[in-house]
Image: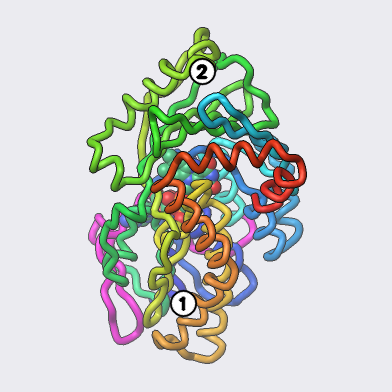
């Protein structure tokens, strides 16, 4: 059997691609190495874009997700630089939710609302070009054939490596760790918190509230800085808590309910090739995480939808050439290129001259300028 579209990976990018193909009349296969519900190391902040993307596919999908009882509404954020802090209100509400719950909900929506053939517990090993499209082999010796492949297999993407020749570039990767805590004092369930501190520069620390009185607590830093300074990320997370006086106080009664786990974030600080003959890469496989905020879920879902729209074009025109696929790259960059490029520049400047944050925080105390900054968020 030859499938029309094979989606590699059932995270937010892959599931959104499957949802966006629900009415296309194509034979879609979704392959996933884990068995849902499965965890994904993340900060668990679900950007408003995630719901907005579902709305563009079908308003009832957005409603189903935004009323999911595990989602916690966040309305504001606090950013602390050494001892200074700034508060911003979100223009559009965002959410937090453990990825265990959020991804499982999204996966359930694919099961419920689409005719996608889903195979879990199958790890893709190789993707080989054939005359019809691609042959995808898994770890159990099964081979699946498809005319078009959507690579949605995350930060360590096999599809990106084998189809687009991606190699790790630490200048464009963030390394991050996180753990779940309970009893962190002063956690406001509608507010996310980010901390930057000169002792841990150029890293950043976060506390994101999670349903049930928990907090997702993490620390991230550009991978090239981690390598150059030989940083132990897990230790840095604990040191951050034990060194910053305000956090020391707030974590006095806190207990970690999980170990500290890490994962990498391929950021969109440069435009990469996202497609080729009969394939597209989406989400982390296409390096689409925001280099400043570290948010990738909304961008993953947006690219998943755009890849589905391009797939429909390919079948409509019977054109799977690399040249035709470039329309997908252009659509992604038109939607995200402006903000990714702006944030990439900001990240570069702040990394070279972190003292500039003093000016940013001083300016942020002036109300009209703070409002402008808030708009930019
Ligand atoms: C520590 C940390 C904190 C973060 N915090 C945030 C945050 O707060 N908010 C935010 O928006 N983003 C955050 N991100 C980024 C976010 O996690 C990713 O951008 C998002 O998960 C991308 O979705 P995806 O579908 O592209 O990839 P993934 O979510 O990684 O999904 C990929 C899927 O493919 C499967 N897979 C992988 N390899 C194979 C294979 N060989 N065969 C079959 N299946 C395979 C995986 O099991 C997985 O289900 C964070 C990332 C990290 C590491």
**Which residue appears at 40% of the width and 49% of the height?**
265
Segment tinted magenta in the rendering:
112-141
Q: Label 1: which residue?
A: 4
Residue 148 in percent (x, y) is at 42, 77
Q: Label 2: which residue?
A: 247
Residue 33 in percent (x, y) is at 36, 51
**Which residue appears at 30% of the width and 59% of the height?**
124
Residue 69 in percent (x, y) is at 70, 36
Mark 1 secondary-structure assignment: strand
How would you rate the neighbour count of disc 2 (Cα within 10 Å): few for under 14, some for 14-19, many for 20 or more?
some
* Residue 67 to residue 55: above or below: above
Whether label 2 lies within 8 Å of ligand 1 gets the answer no
Residue 370 lies in what quarter of the image?
A: top right
Instruction: Examine the rendering and report whether any part of residue 246 can be seen.
Output: yes
User: Reading the chain from its start, which is encountered first: label 2 or label 1?
Assistant: 1
* Residue 327 to residue 152: above or below: below
């Amino acid at each position: 059997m030859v499938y029309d579209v094979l989606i590699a990976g059932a995270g937010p990018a892959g599931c959104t691609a499957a949802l966006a193909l629900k009415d296309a009349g194509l034979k879609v296969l979704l392959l996933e190495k884990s068995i849902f519900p499965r965890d994904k190391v993340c900060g668990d902040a679900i950007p408003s874009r995630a719901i907005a993307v579902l709305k563009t596919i079908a308003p009832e999908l957005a409603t189903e997700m935004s009323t999911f009882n595990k989602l916690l509404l966040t309305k504001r954020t606090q950013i602390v630089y050494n001892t200074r802090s700034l508060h911003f209100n979100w223009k559009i509400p965002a959410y937090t939710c453990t990825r265990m719950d959020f991804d499982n909900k999204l996966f359930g929506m694919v099961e419920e609302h689409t005719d996608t053939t889903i195979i879990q517990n199958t790890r893709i090993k190789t993707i080989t070009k054939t005359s019809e499209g691609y042959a995808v082999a898994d770890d159990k010796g099964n081979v699946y054939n498809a005319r078009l492949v959507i690579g949605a297999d995350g930060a360590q993407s096999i599809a990106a490596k084998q189809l687009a020749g991606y190699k790790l570039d630490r200048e464009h990767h963030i390394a991050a760790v996180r753990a779940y805590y309970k009893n962190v004092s002063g956690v406001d369930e509608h507010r996310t918190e980010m901390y930057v501190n000169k002792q841990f520069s150029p890293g950043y620390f976060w506390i994101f509230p999670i349903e049930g009185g928990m907090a997702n607590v993490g620390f991230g830093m550009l991978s090239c800085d981690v390598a150059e300074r030989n940083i132990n990320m897990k230790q840095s997370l604990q040191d951050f808590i034990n060194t910053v006086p305000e956090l020391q106080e707030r974590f006095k009664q806190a207990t970690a309910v999980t170990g500290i786990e890490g994962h990498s974030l391929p950021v969109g600080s440069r435009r990469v090739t996202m497609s080729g003959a009969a394939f597209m890469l989406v989400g982390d496989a296409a390096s689409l995480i925001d280099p400043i905020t570290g948010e990738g879920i909304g961008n993953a879902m947006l690219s998943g939808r755009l890849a589905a729209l391009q797939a429909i074009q390919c079948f409509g025109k019977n054109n799977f050439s690399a040249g035709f696929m470039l329309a997908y790259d252009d659509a992604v960059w038109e939607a995200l290129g402006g903000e990714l490029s702006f944030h990439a520049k900001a990240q570069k400047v702040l990394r070279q001259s972190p003292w500039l944050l003093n000016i940013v925080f001083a300016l942020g105390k002036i109300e009209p300028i703070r409002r402008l900054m808030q708009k930019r968020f």
